[in-house]
């Protein structure tokens, strides 16, 4: 069982930056891909960025260049650096851990609110 706790959300002006953190209760350094997703009011949850256990990353096309995902396996923590924030980035951001093995298994954090004012 893995528990994920996000932190770092808040209110920021357009053009500003935030760093989100996601701390895992168990070891996710091996065999877990970590990801950030977001859900804006009235919209479906969407992928923001992924990083697999080997460190390879993948981003939603529109966000690449502004957002950076990274992980610290020693701390069981994944980060999302968000720069040049826009009002349309306003959403609840969720951390996800997905097992990379044959069994489908994933965990979600409770989410952290990011609000970007214009």
Image (tube, rainbow, N blue to C red):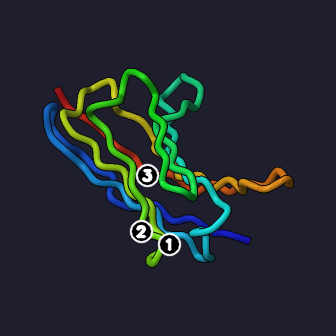
Indicate the secondary structure of the residue bearing disc 3.
strand
Q: Which mark is residue 59?
A: none
Task: Please identify the quarter of the rendering in which residue 46 is found.
Answer: top right
Q: Is residue 114 above or below residue 111?
A: above
N-term mark: 2 or 3 = 2
Where residue 20 appears, x then y in whole percent?
35, 55
Residue identifier under label 1: 76
**109 or 33: nearer the viewer:** 33
Give the quadrant of the C terminus.
Answer: top left
* Residue located farthest toward the right when viewing the structure as drawn: 103
Q: Which residue: 51% across, 44% down?
A: 50
Q: Which residue: 33% across, 24% down?
A: 88
Q: Are marks 2 and 3 in contact (CB under 8 Å)?
A: no
Where residue 55 appears, x then y in whole percent?
48, 54
Q: Which mark is residue 72?
A: 2
Q: Are marks 1 and 2 in contact (CB under 8 Å)?
A: yes
Q: Which residue: 36% across, 28% down?
A: 63
Give me the C-alpha separation between circle 1 and circle 3: 18 Å
**37 or 73: nearer the viewer:** 73
């Amino acid at each position: 069982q893995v528990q994920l706790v996000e932190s770092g959300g808040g209110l920021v002006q357009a053009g500003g930056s935030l760093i989100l953190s996601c701390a895992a209760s168990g070891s996710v350094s091996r065999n877990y891909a970590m990801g950030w997703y977001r859900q804006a009011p009235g919209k479906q949850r969407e992928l923001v960025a992924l990083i697999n256990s080997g460190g390879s990353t993948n981003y939603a096309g529109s966000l690449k260049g502004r957002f950076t995902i990274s992980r610290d396996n020693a701390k069981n923590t994944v980060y999302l650096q968000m720069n040049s924030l826009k009002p349309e980035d306003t959403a609840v951001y969720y951390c996800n851990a997905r097992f990379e093995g044959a069994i489908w298994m994933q965990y979600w954090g409770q989410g952290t609110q990011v609000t970007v004012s214009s």
